Amino acid sequence: MPERREKRLTSRIVNLEEQLAALRSAEVVLKTSEDRYRKIFDYAPVSIREEDVTALEAAFDKLRAQGISDFRRYFDEHPDFLDKAQKLIKIVTLNEATLALYGAKSREELVGALERTLVPESMSVFREELVAFAEGKETFEGENINQTLDGRRINILAKIIYLPKPGRREKVVVCTVDITREKQAMKALEEEILQNHLILETALDGFFIADTRGKIKEANLAASRITGYDRHELMKMNLKDIDGCVITSADKKQGKMRSFRLHERFERTCRRKSGEMIDIEVSQNFLEINDEKFYFYFFSDISNRKRAVAELHEREKELAEQSQKLEEANVALRVLLKRVEADKRILEEDVMFNIKDLVFPYLDKLRKTGLSTIQTSYLSVITSNLKDVISSFPSHLHNQFSELTPSEIQIANLVKQGKSSKEVSEILGLSPRTIETHRRNVRKKLGIRGHGTNLRTHLSKLDNG
């Protein structure tokens, strides 16, 4: 018996030693795991913190004991509970990334109350966190707004890991990522999209985006105004459905999009919904995004401009015709004026020569007939008046011929007409020698004697003078 007891005792001792050895091994493994976890925790690039929620769990237990199960409704009726809950949650441990996220110089600045990182804008999401906690959810994830210790607002994405029910919850792990830059970039992108949308909506030109099959993906108000279709109609249509609008009739019959160049500018005649035909100018561009290909078009109604250009061309044509007619009339008028001027000169010349040839000689003879004093006075008046008449004629008619005798004037006129000395002698009944003498006298009085100038040419120049 004693031996049996001794064996049993020995066996128990051996088992106990084995258990102690296993326990020590487990402690070593656990410590190693804890050290590894601590290093990961401390140096992770993401903010990680542990929060003590013991007091918060106790507060919810009291509410449940009071029969409260709809915590959203309770929070609506008791919004002050949210302020209380902030103070019940205590930050216990945190890593280096958490210090950097909230601008803390040491852990002591953040350890303690959670309320230092929350702001009024945080409450709506914080309320949902509490609801998830109260309802026994295992995790919660959402975007929120927090505050750094220097008062700067930051956008964060938080994931909270709760211990599952029914165990009592004492701690939670909160992982937080700063998404402020992403939110700012998203806001800037949204503002740019909105601005571009407003620009397109208020543009005077129509705008289409269509896929390679012609299906309209986007259209602005001007596109509706120009085509006559409202936007809802356009969004259900293909470009081929709008006769002549960026797609030709030939393309429409073929039932396919024309193979456009990437960038092209052209004009079309488009049929509006009402059936009215209008002229449009189209600017087409091609765009490829994420392997999707699109055509986008800007187009404007140029009907008024085309009509104005056509009217301008018609007006220019009319003006050209009128100008041609006016030029022809001016030519005819110049010819007529030249003829009238020539006739006037001939008339003045005839009058002057006739007065000198046919009137003055007889006045001279009349003066020698023994007139009375009164008759002599009248004769002087007549002579003076006749001289006044011929003095008003152009100077070339009398200045050059004022020194010529009547016979010399007759001979000069015949020479100017191209008559030879022989022909002049026959016309006037004078000898050729007398005619030559008169010709020399005419040349002398006109100042061209000895110059070699042709008398007829000189007389013609004086006549055109």
Image: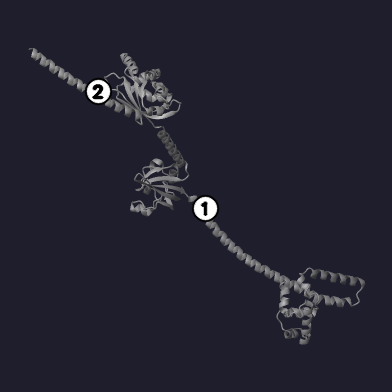
Quadrant into which the N terminus falls: top left
**Which element carries disc 1, helix, strand or loop?**
helix
| Kind of residue at badge 2 | Glu
State the separation of the CA atoms marked 1 and 2: 96 Å
User: Seen in the image, is 346 located left or right of residue 295?
Assistant: right
Tell us which disc is closer to us: 1 or 2.
Answer: 2
Frontmost residue, 301 versus 361: 301
Bin the neighbour count of mark 2 within 10 Å (Cα to Cα): few under 14, some 14-19, many 20 and up.
few
Identify the mark at residue 27; answer none if there is no mark: 2
**Residue under the image location 56 percent in, 62 percent down:** 321
Q: Position of residue 407 (x, y in %)?
A: 79, 80
**Residue under the image location 44 percent in, 50 percent down:** 282
Q: Single out the residue that lies furthest toward the right.
A: 373
User: Seen in the image, is 26 located left or right of residue 126?
Assistant: left
Q: Position of residue 299 (x, y in %)?
A: 44, 48
As displayed, is residue 98 above or below residue 324? above
Frontmost residue, 389 versus 211: 211
Q: Single out the residue that lies furthest toward the top.
A: 2
Identify the mark at residue 308; answer none if there is no mark: 1
Residue 278 in view (yes/no): no
**Residue under the image location 45 percent in, 40 percent down:** 196
Q: Position of residue 242 (x, y in %)?
A: 39, 48
**Residue under the image location 55 percent in, 59 percent down:** 318
As displayed, is residue 47 above or below residue 400? above
**Which element carries disc 2, helix, strand or loop?**
helix
Residue 146 in view (yes/no): yes
